[in-house]
Image (cartoon, helix red, strand yellow):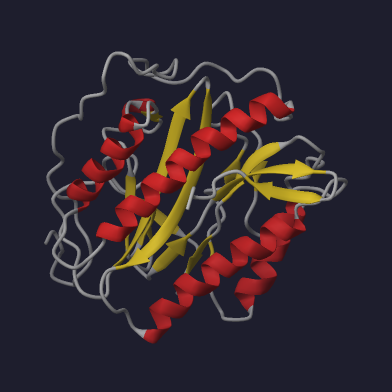
Amino acid sequence: MPKDASGHLIPGRIGPLRRVDPSITRPEYVGKAGPAKHTGGDVYDDETVERIRAAGTIAADAIAAVGAAVRPGITTDELDAIGHDYVTSHGAYPSTLGYRDFPKSVCSSINEVICHGIPDDTVLGEGDIVNIDITAYKDGVHGDSNRTFIAGTASDEVTQLVERTEESLRRAIKAALPGRRVNVIGRTIEMYAKRFGYGVVRDFTGHGVGTSFHSGLIIPHYDTDRFDTEIVPGMVFTIEPMLTLGTHEWDMWADDWTVVTKDRSITAQFEHTIVVRETGAEILTLPSA
C-alpha cells in the first residue's frame, strides 16, 4: 500500500483511461482544458429537474455498487472500474472523466484525503474509510453525489465521524428553505460539527449543478456571511460537507487534485444534489432501491 514511514498516504500508480462507448454523449468539456462558462442560472423547470434526477439516480446506484465492494484488500482502481462500468452501462457518462484532465471516473478519497482522490493501485486496509464521489451525465445534465464507506471495522472515533458527517448533511438539507440565504446551510453544518470538536472544511464547497457540472454558485459548509445568494424554488445545487478530526486546513498533492488535511487527520464527506421546492428541499440523488 502506498504509505510513507508515518503511515500516511502517498500517490500510487494510476492506470490507463477507461473506454466509453462512442454512442454515449460526452459533456462539452471532454478533450478541452476546461468547461465552457455556465449560462442559464441555477433555477430549472420541472422537466429539467426530472432529467437531473434520472442522472442522479444513476450516480447514486453506481455509488451503492462501489460501496458494496469496499473491503480490505481491494484497490481504489478496482472500485473505479465498478463505478465506471455501472454508469456507462446505463447510458451515462462519468462526469469526472476528462474534466480538467481528471483521469478517472470516480473520486476515491481515503482517510486524510478530503476530496478529489484519484483511483490508483492503493489497497484499502482494515479500518480505512473511503469517500466515493460519482457524477453521471445523461440527457444534457449532471447528477452529483458521494458517500463515505468503511473497509472492515474502524475505530469508534472514525465511525462516529462518518455517521455525524452524514447527519450534518441531513440537517443542512432541511435548512435549505426558500427565502433563506445559502449561508444558512454552512451555519447549520458548523453548529452541529462544533458540538464534537470537528474541523469543517471551508475552501471546498457545494455548487450549482445541472446543465453544467459546476455552475459557479457556491454553497458554503461553514458559518460565513461571504456567500449570501437567496435560495429560491427550482434552484438545484449540491451540499457536501467535509468534516475532519483535526484542522480544516489542507495541502494539495502534486497531481493538482488530491486534497489532504494539513495535519493528516481523518476526514469524511457526504453529498446530495437537491432541488428547492416551496416547502423545502427534495433530494435528486437517491438510489433506485
Residue 141: image x %, image y %? 54, 25
- Front residue of this view, candidates 238 and 65: 65
Q: Residue at x 41, y 61 (%)?
A: 148
Look at the picture and state if 127 lies above or below 257: below
How many marks are shown on the rendered structure?
Answer: 0
Q: Is residue 109 visible?
A: no
Residue 70: quarter of image: bottom left
Residue 245: quarter of image: bottom left
Q: Is residue 21 visible?
A: yes
Q: Residue furthest front?
A: 289
26 sits left or right of 2 in the view: right
Look at the picture and state if 283 lies above or below 235: below
Q: Residue at x 56, y 79 (%)?
A: 197
Look at the picture and state if 240 lies above or below 213: below
Q: Residue at x 19, y 29 (%)?
A: 17
- Front residue of this view, candidates 122 and 57: 57
Q: Residue at x 21, y 25 (%)?
A: 19
Residue 279: image x %, image y %? 84, 50
104 sits left or right of 200 in the view: left
Residue 262: quarter of image: bottom left
- Front residue of this view, candidates 137 and 101: 137
Look at the picture and state if 71 lies above or below 181: below
276 sits left or right of 18 in the view: right
Q: Residue furthest right?
A: 179
Q: Residue furthest bottom?
A: 156
Please state, as top left, top right, bottom left or bottom right, where the N terminus lies in the image: bottom left
Residue 123: image x %, image y %? 15, 60
